[in-house]
Amino acid sequence: MSLQNGHLAPDTTLDSPAAAGMALQAQGLTLTYVTPRATTYAVREVTLSINERDFAGIVGPSGSGKSSLLYLLAGLKTATSGTVFLGDFDYSHASATERLDFRRQHFGFVFQQPFLVPYLNVLENVLVPIENPDTTHKQRALELLDRLGVVDLAPKFPNECSGGERVRVATARGIVHRPTYLFVDEPTASLDTATGARVMKTLQSQCDHGALIVVTHDLEILDEADMVFRMRDGALVESFQPQRLTA
Ligand SMILES: Nc1ncnc2c1ncn2[C@@H]1O[C@H](COP(=O)(O)OP(=O)(O)O)[C@@H](O)[C@H]1O
Ligand SMILES: [Mg+2]
């Protein structure tokens, strides 16, 4: 990765689509919210690149555009201008159906609100991203719940779980199908430090097979990130590799 005018420019080796693999590259991404009273630039001209196995962080104060940028990168919001490429696929200009198929196949999400399905038990909720789960998938789901300290909740329903437990169930659901890209918004916001560390460790196991992108206001949980992008007022103002406290 290289830095140009404070922005990350794509690697020259990524110019050829064949060499690009599944790198995610955003170019001039902008998102404005227009209301009768004001136009807000939630994201301004963001250019960055994240490689297939990277653990990337996005930090910045509240309202700086972190969630909006994450949603643009994940194709859940449509940019006002700019593009997002995944490998050689222009994801930002694909049809809604193409995007949906692509998202199902390649993406995982952990939203700030856990959004579990109320009539499915915890194990069934974790298995939602998998079309026809078999015993291997169930085994993986239970292992993830175990790593997150909530395996005993497998037969319970979301309304029997605490807020922090639901976040952990949603974390297992985001990662269970081994997505190519896992997008996570404020994973530790409602957790104590020890549980937060456990969630981060589980999320980071994603990088064995794919990329992890975590939005947070807490730089400490990005200690092991390959790259951190800092946002202010919608713009990407800095990108850096964190000092590893545990190097
Ligand atoms: N649906 C919306 N309508 C209008 N403004 C919005 C909307 N969502 C977010 N914003 C504004 O966009 C800016 C960035 O918001 P957001 O991406 O949620 O920031 P962060 O995740 O860093 O807190 C803020 O000024 C926020 O008020
Ligand atoms: Mg946010």
Image (cartoon, grey):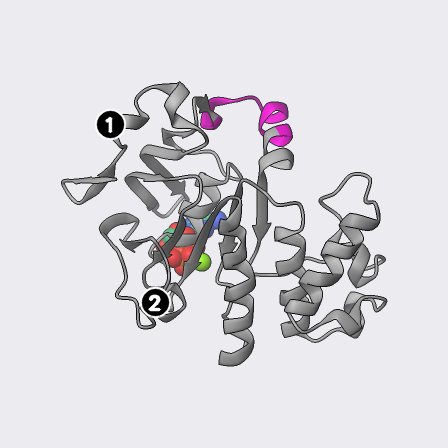
User: Residue 109 appears at what percent x and percent y?
Assistant: 58, 49
User: Residue 123 appears at what percent x and percent y?
Assistant: 79, 59
73 relative to 228, above or below: above
The quadrant where residue 73 appears: top left
User: Residue 210 appears at what percent x and percent y?
Assistant: 51, 44
- Is the CB of the residue bearing disc 2 within 8 angstroms of ligand 1? no
Q: What residue span does the magenta drawing correspond to?
A: 91-101
Furthest residue to the front?
247
Query: Which of the two discs, 2 and 1, labels the residue nearer the N terminus?
Result: 1
Task: Give me the C-alpha separation between circle 2 and circle 1.
Answer: 29 Å
- Is the CB of the residue bearing disc 1 within 8 angstroms of ligand 1? no
Q: Amino acid at mark 2?
A: Leu
Q: Is residue 190 visible?
A: no
User: Residue 127 appears at what percent x and percent y?
Assistant: 76, 50
Element class at badge 2? helix
Q: In this orientation, which residue lies closer to the viewer: 84 or 203?
A: 203
Magenta segment includes 90:
no
191 relative to 24, above or below: below
Q: Which residue is mark 2?
A: 219
Q: Are marks 2 and 1 in contact (CB under 8 Å)?
A: no
Residue at point 44%, 56% (across, down) = 214
Q: Nearer the viewer, mark 2 or mark 1?
A: 1
Element class at badge 1? helix
**Crowd tier of the residue under label 2, counting other residues whose Cα lies within 10 Å: few below 14, some 14–19, many 20 or above:** some
Q: Main secondary structure of the magenta part?
A: helix
Q: Amino acid at mark 1?
A: Thr
Q: Which mark is residue 12?
A: 1
Residue at point 51%, 54% (across, down) = 184
The quadrant where residue 230 appears: bottom left
Q: Is residue 118 visible?
A: yes
Residue at point 59%, 26% (across, down) = 96
